[in-house]
Amino acid sequence: MMQYKGYNGRVEFDDEADIFHGEVLGLRDVITFQGRNVDEVKQAFRDSVEDYLEYCAKRGEEPEKPFTGKLMLRIPPDIHRKAYIAAKQSGASLNSWITQTLKNSTEHVF
């Protein structure tokens, strides 16, 4: 995974074509990039993000952001109830408790 200006890119290696190729994650728009080595694919990722931002600016559109901070979540009612009780027992709102729980669970992720 790579990050640039809040955008995340995933890279794979195509052994048959002998090339790295990747895409920017979390967008409806499709943004891809490729390179023959690590330096090339990193630069291609940054260039693709820059091209996307410039394209949006020329069209007068807001670029899509990968994550808005809003998460629609469907969970079984019993887990919802247990999470609510856990939040109340810790003195937090359900939103704050879920945020802290997710934060604790993802600290190892960049």
Image (cartoon, helix red, strand yellow):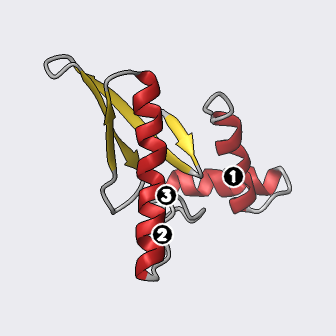
Q: Which residue is mark 1?
A: 99
- Per the image, label 2 sits on a secondary structure element best described as loop
- Binning the other alpha carbons within 10 Å of mark 3 as few (below 14), some (14 to 19) or many (20 upward) gives some
- Per the image, label 3 sits on a secondary structure element best described as loop
Q: Residue furthest bottom?
A: 60
- Residue lying at 39% horizontally and 58% vertically, measured from the top left: 27
Foreground: 57 or 2? 57
Separation of residues labelled 2 and 3 (CA atoms): 9 Å
Which circle marks residue 66 in the picture?
3
Q: Residue furthest right?
A: 91
Lower sequence index among marks 3 and 1: 3
Foreground: 70 or 2? 2
Camera sees residue 75: no
**Does residue 55 appear to the left or right of 62 in the view shown?**
left
Task: Give the tally of numbered discs.
Answer: 3
Lower sequence index among marks 2 and 1: 2
- Residue 92 in the image: state x and y as whole percent: 81, 58
Q: Are marks 3 and 1 in contact (CB under 8 Å)?
A: no
Q: Which residue is mark 2?
A: 63
Camera sees residue 44: yes
Separation of residues labelled 2 and 1 (CA atoms): 26 Å
Q: Tell me which amino acid carries mark 2.
A: Pro
Q: Nearer the viewer, mark 3 or mark 1?
A: 3
Name the quadrant containing residue 21.
top left
- Binning the other alpha carbons within 10 Å of mark 2 as few (below 14), some (14 to 19) or many (20 upward) gives some
Q: Are marks 2 and 1 in contact (CB under 8 Å)?
A: no
- Residue lying at 53% horizontally and 59% vertically, measured from the top left: 67
Name the quadrant containing residue 93.
bottom right
- Residue 102 in the image: state x and y as whole percent: 64, 44
Q: In this picture, is 108 found above or below 100?
A: above
**Does residue 89 appear to the left or right of 78 in the view shown?**
right
